[in-house]
Image (tube, grey):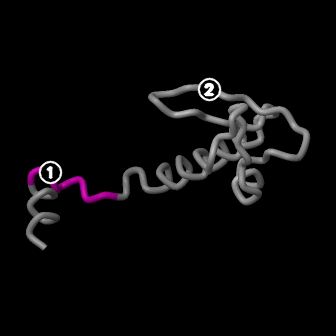
């Protein structure tokens, strides 16, 4: 991707679609740890990320308490290292 003399870039269509950025829509631009973050101003991408996080947390909750409580951390580490 190249930046024009006016500081403009063209966001590829597949990335705009994934981020929920529609033609003529507003976007937000933030700076975080050396990165520019461009997002749809309507929060579509944020809503999608939150939904994905909720699905992940739900899956983790299902696993809670299913592990073998008789195995301590040292035993588990030995089992996973010695494969």
Q: CA distance from mark 2 to mark 1?
A: 44 Å
Q: Are the residues tagged 2 and 1 within 8 Å (C-beta)?
A: no
Compared with residue 23, is residue 17 higher up or lower down, i.e. above or below? Answer: below
73 sits left or right of 22 in the view: left
Query: Residue 39 at what x, y percent from top left?
Result: 70, 37
Looking at the picture, tell me which residue is in the foreground, 20 or 64.
20
Query: Residue 3 at what x, y percent from top left?
Result: 64, 41
Any magenta on residue 71? yes
Query: Residue 47 at what x, y percent from top left?
Result: 72, 40
Q: Identify the residue shown where x is 23% and y is 53%.
A: 69
The label shown at residue 40 is none
Q: Identify the residue shown where x is 73% and y is 47%.
A: 10
Asked which secondary structure carries label 2, the reply is strand
76 sits left or right of 32 in the view: left
Query: Residue 37 at what x, y percent from top left?
Result: 61, 34
Q: Which residues are magenta?
A: 67-74
Asked which secondary structure carries label 1, the reply is loop
Q: In the orientation shown, which residue stands out farthest toward the front?
A: 5
Compared with residue 59, is residue 49 higher up or lower down, i.e. above or below? Answer: above
Any magenta on residue 29? no
**Mark 2 highlights which residue?**
30
Badge nearest the viewer, 2 or 1:
2
Q: Identify the residue shown where x is 13% and y is 73%.
A: 83
**Mark 1 highlights which residue?**
72
């Amino acid at each position: 991707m190249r930046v024009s003399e006016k500081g403009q870039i063209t966001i590829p269509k597949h990335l705009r679609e994934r981020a929920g950025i529609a033609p003529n829509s507003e976007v937000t631009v933030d700076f975080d740890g050396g990165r520019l973050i461009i997002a749809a101003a309507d929060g579509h991408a944020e809503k999608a990320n939150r939904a994905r996080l909720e699905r992940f947390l739900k899956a983790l909750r299902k696993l809670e308490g299913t592990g073998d409580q008789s195995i301590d951390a040292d035993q588990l580490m030995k089992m996973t290292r010695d494969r």
